[in-house]
Image (cartoon, rainbow, N blue to C red):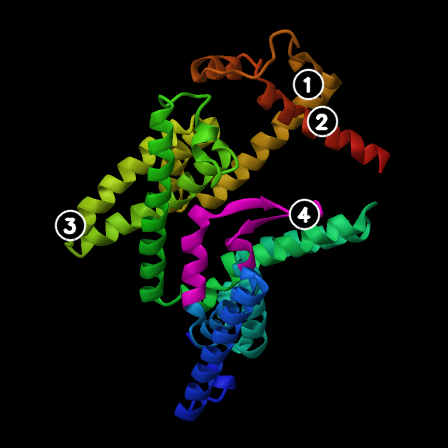
Amino acid sequence: MKLNQWFDTNEHSKQSIAIGISCLTILCIAGSILLDQIALMIVPLGMVLALVSIYRFSWVYLLFFMTIPFSIEIYLPSGLGTDLPTEPLMLLLTGIGLVLGIFSIKKIPKSYLRNPITIMLLLHVFWIFFTAVTSQNQIISFKYLLAKIWYLVPCYFMAVFILKDRSWFVKWRALFAIALTISVTYVVVRHAGLGFSFDGINKAGSPIYRNHVNYAALLVVFLPYLWTLWVDARKQTRIFVALVTGVTILYILLATYLTYTRAAHACVFIMIGAYFIIRMRWVRPAAYASLIIMFLGVSTLFINNRYLDLAPNFERTVSHHSYDNLLEATYKMEDLSTMERVYRWVAGVQMINER
């Protein structure tokens, strides 16, 4: 994968670039020593990253995904926040993706553009743009819109240029599996020091993961890719790879359980059902059934304000420090986090009446 079709790539040019970067690096090292500013060393690193982006942007794409399991959320003095090193890489990849979209739009398969997921994502972005225009605080709303774009371009739209190549998909899957396993091991070892306690999982995941929910989400999202890695290894009779992948799947499942995240645990079982729904080509009937059930459920709650019957007893609706107590409180509708989600939707409906 190259962008260098728009750049001169003869040997003399390459030598000039190498000499230029070397001189720039020496100047930055001297400047950082004399001025006591280590930040100057970012300049040559940025130049190298820019060149790699031009000549081998697929490497930057793989680097971005490999850094996700190690990304740390940083809060800046201005009140802004970012994830390092992933968000700067996403900005870079978004720029590359826009250039590719302009110069290679004819190479994008029409089936990709007509895919329901692509259409839904584009409608999603358009709706965010519409609500940003009509927002009471347009600065914050448009920041959210821009952030949404630089998430979607690298994570979804650039895949048509890179992951359509089977060899790159295999590399992406294997490298991400290695990076995730290392990150999970870091959390598990720290969690073991805290006795694998329910209260200790958030502390064990820091500073990489903001909370146990983010950690669990990353694990369950990648589980299907690990499964395909195992299936492919078995088909190709690569016994060692299949064995290692199988052990890794069990390890990730154990780590998922130790996150003590109800949604992640439910997702593992939902994935099994989803596999058979997709395999048996029942996606459309399942989607219709889900919409009908959701509509009936919501309608039932709002008839005569029945949702008020679910109002929890504030003396018993508290945060829990034991996973067993949390599960018990969930089905009794006495869990704080569960009920706050119900009332967010109620608040959203009432806000429509206001504006």
In-image side of 299 versus 223 (left or right): right
Q: Which residues are magenta?
A: 59-88
- The residue singled out by tag 4 in the image is 80
Q: Earlier in the sequence, mark 2 or mark 4?
A: 4
At label 3, the amino acid type is Phe
Task: Give the numbered dot on residue 307.
Answer: 1
Q: Quadrant of the N terminus?
A: bottom left
The percent coordinates of residue 199 (x first, y second) are: 46, 21
* Pick the front one: 52 or 218: 52
Q: Are marks 1 and 4 in contact (CB under 8 Å)?
A: no
- The mark tally for this picture is 4
Q: Secondary structure at mark 4?
A: loop
Q: Which mark is residue 135?
A: none
Nearer mark to the viewer, of 1 and 2: 2
Specify whether residue 280 is in view.
no
Helix, strand or loop at mark 2 = helix
Evaluate if marks 1 and 2 touch, with contact meaning CB atoms under 8 Å apart. Answer: yes
Q: Earlier in the sequence, mark 1 or mark 3?
A: 3
Cα separation, mark 1 vs mark 2, equals 8 Å
Q: Which residue is located at x 44 percent, y 28 percent? A: 201
The location of residue 29, given as percent across then percent down, is 49, 69
